[in-house]
Image (tube, helix red, strand yellow):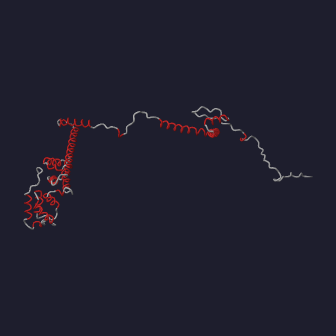
Amino acid sequence: MGVAPPPRLESSAQSPLRNPVFVRSGTSLADVEPVPLPHLALPSRPPLAAAPDSDAAVQLAAVSNGAPAAAGQFERARRFLGRHPALWMLLAPGSIAVSAVALLHATAAQRPPSSGRAVPAPSQVVQPSTAASTDASAAQLAKLEARPPESLNARELALLADAHTEALRASAKALRAKLEANPALGKDPALQSELMRLAEDTRTSADALSAMAALEAPLGADLLYEVWTRTPVRTDATDLARALVYSADVRPKASPALAVALDLRLAESCQQYKLILPKALKDGDRRSAHLLAKLNAKRGCGPKKSDDCYACVREPGDELKATINAVKSRRPPDFGAR
């Protein structure tokens, strides 16, 4: 019984290459032609006409743009967006918005001002004159001054008080400027009395004391000392007067008589007082009398306050007494009742 020999296999070198054959049943999805998607029209544009796939459309685009290269790029972009309608729908609104914003900016830059008048700068705005309001206020104050005080209400009385204060301050400042410009005017007794009056008022004391400090020697220092010592009550005016009279530019202008009083007020020990006695005997006036009189006390020092504090000034027994009598005989400058 004979068996048929197997078919002869050709070697890969002798047999030609053949493509494999696949046998399948049914129909594959790849064999079905995809359904073409319709062209979508933007809401703000009319629907696109027939697809300009013809050469005439391409040539028309190239002619309208003026450059064949630009026409080719436009055609490739159109075909790409035609194959991807979803991408075109996403990009179109953004492109339109950007174009609209650019158009608005360009229009605003070229638009002329809405009003023909130029808006003046803040520095060019003319402020209303205050002369009218000042005159009105002066007239109002004059009417209030003419009325009896009991007919005024609290607000009107306060307005009058403020007006008086401002007038006093303005007068004091004007007098100060006048004396600083010409210190020799301080020799006028009437002006000296005016300065003393202004120094007693808390509203004008600072200007009055500053004016005194500017006067010629020895008048300015004498006036300041008078303000400082004429009252036992300590005030802002007395503190300022003391500071001014001891200041570096006023203290050297003090008279010899006032210099004795200033030295006695600064002395603390018995030896310091003893050094001042010869000057007081020669130049001192009544302003130093009570400062020397306290040296007669023989008690007040030591642990029990029973020791003599100023024994050294009484060693020559008649020196202190003679000095006190000498200063009492000399009158100080007179600036009004003490």
Q: Residue at x 20, y 36 (%)?
A: 142
Q: Position of residue 269 (x, y in %)?
A: 16, 64
Q: Position of residue 309 (x, y in %)?
A: 13, 65
256 to the left or right of 41: left
Please name whichever residue, 308 or 331, is drawn nearer the observer in this view of the structure: 331
Q: Is residue 65 above or below residue 279?
A: above
Please name whichever residue, 72 or 133, is drawn nearer the observer in this view of the structure: 72
Number of marks present in the image shown: 0
Please name whichever residue, 299 or 210, is drawn nearer the observer in this view of the structure: 210
- Residue at the right extreme of this rendering: 1
Residue 38 appears in view: no
Q: Residue at x 71, y 38 (%)?
A: 33
Q: Is residue 150 above or below residue 307?
A: above
293 to the left or right of 58: left
Q: Position of residue 205 (x, y in %)?
A: 19, 49
Q: Quadrant of residue 299?
A: bottom left
